Image: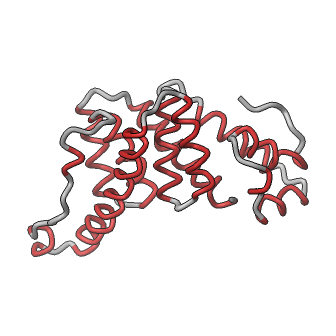
Amino acid sequence: MFGIATESNAAVSLLQELGIAEASLSANLKALAAADSKYLRDLKINVTNALGAETLSRKEAYLLAVAVAANEKNVVLQDAFTASAVANGASDKEVAEAIACTSLLNANNVYYRFRHFMHEEFYNNAQAGIRMSIMAQPVLGKEFFELVSLAISALNGCELCVTSHEKTLVGHGTAKQRIHDAVRLAAVLKSLAVLL
């Protein structure tokens, strides 16, 4: 996916390969490029490998990337990944659902993380009262919706949600390598979002 580049132009090359204009080059990326940081090359390799995981279709990888970008509130990445998802066959409804899933999981992650932290019977038995109708018949399909849910929950650090979604995925017959690749993609893209 990405060509070989020196550290000094790796930042611009990375953005170009993702469909992001050079004008979006952040102060963080400029600082790394100015210092001829070898990390930029590592980052390009990490992004390439994560987006190219064999267990994820190109459409799935970019829809998951849209969800991660939305979670990290990074409009530049979200716009670029949305364009790539659409170019790889994603519908507007699928893109919208990836974003909606991210929003829902942010509510769930805060709520269930609180319950987990408290270790109190009252909170554990209280009705969540968080409507989740999009989970019933997701446009993305139940397995992929769960995969996105797991990746976002991992980013947001909710142990209860992570273990619950992983268990559901394994129950659906999802290979652990696919689960691993989805979480790795989320982690790598979060590292990219930090620099943009």
Residue 35 in the figure: left or right of residue 156: right
In the depicted view, which residue is nearer to us: 146 or 89? Answer: 89
For the rendered model, the colour scheme is secondary structure
Q: Where is residue 53 in the image (x, y as percent from the top left)?
A: 55, 29
Q: Specify the quadrant of the image occupied by residue 113.
A: bottom left
Q: Where is residue 123 in the image (x, y as percent from the top left)?
A: 15, 73
Quadrant housing the C terminus: bottom right
Q: Position of residue 172 (x, y in %)?
A: 25, 30
Residue lying farthest to the front in this orientation: 92
In the depicted view, which residue is nearer to us: 183 or 3? Answer: 3
Q: In the displayed structure, would residue 152 be above or below residue 89?
A: below
Residue under the point 47% across and 26% down: 55
Residue 47 in the figure: left or right of residue 122: right
Q: Specify the quadrant of the image occupied by residue 84.
A: top right
Q: In the displayed structure, would residue 151 be above or below residue 117?
A: above
Q: Where is residue 52 in the image (x, y as percent from the top left)?
A: 59, 29
Residue under the point 10% across and 70% down: 126
In the depicted view, which residue is nearer to us: 126 or 62? Answer: 62
Q: How many marks?
A: 0
Residue 92 in the figure: left or right of residue 3: left
Quadrant housing the N terminus: top right
In the depicted view, which residue is nearer to us: 43 or 176? Answer: 43
